[in-house]
Amino acid sequence: MHIPDGYLSPQNALPMIAVMVPVLGVAANKVKNDLKKIFEIQWSDNVKARKIDAGLTNRFVKRGKEPVHSQVEVYKFIKAQTS
């Protein structure tokens, strides 16, 4: 593959960087928000969730009012994001 002379010169690279900075900022915020939501879903799981305490006992998390199965909920969240 041939890279032309001057392709990565400051005159060509700076406009490309100036265009990419806002795009990367928006993408980084979306990924950050999606990860936060996925972690919240995971932490709210009460169907098959287990909690490991200081004594390394592996006990089930007690259910709350309505069951939350995190694997199913994360799947629904991701599916809703893509459609």
Image (cartoon, helix red, strand yellow):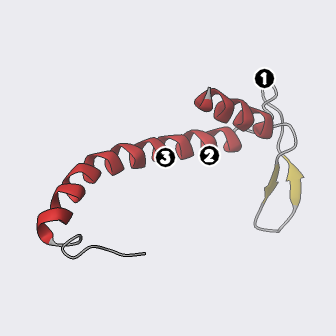
Identify the mark nearer the N-term, 2 or 1. Answer: 2
- In the image, 20: left or right of 51? left
Q: Residue at x 78, y 31 (%)?
A: 68
31 up-or-down from 12: above or below: above
Q: Residue at x 37, y 76 (%)?
A: 2
30 up-or-down from 14: above or below: above
Q: Position of residue 53 (x, y in %)?
A: 77, 61
Q: Quadrant of the N terminus?
A: bottom left
| Residue assigned mark 1 | 65
Tell me which amino acid carries mark 3.
Val
Q: Position of residue 77 (x, y in %)?
A: 65, 32
* Count of marks overlaid on the render: 3
Q: Quadrant of residue 61?
A: top right
Q: What number is the disc on residue 31?
A: 3
Element carrying mark 3: helix
Alpha-carbon distance for marks 2 and 1? 20 Å
Element carrying mark 1: loop
Q: In the rendered structure, are the residues bearing label 3 and label 1 in contact, judged by CB atoms less than 8 Å apart? A: no
19 up-or-down from 62: above or below: below
Q: Quadrant of residue 65?
A: top right
Q: Position of residue 44 (x, y in %)?
A: 70, 38
Identify the mark nearer the N-term, 3 or 1. Answer: 3
Q: Quadrant of residue 82?
A: top right
- In the image, 63: left or right of 44? right
Q: What number is the disc on residue 39?
A: 2
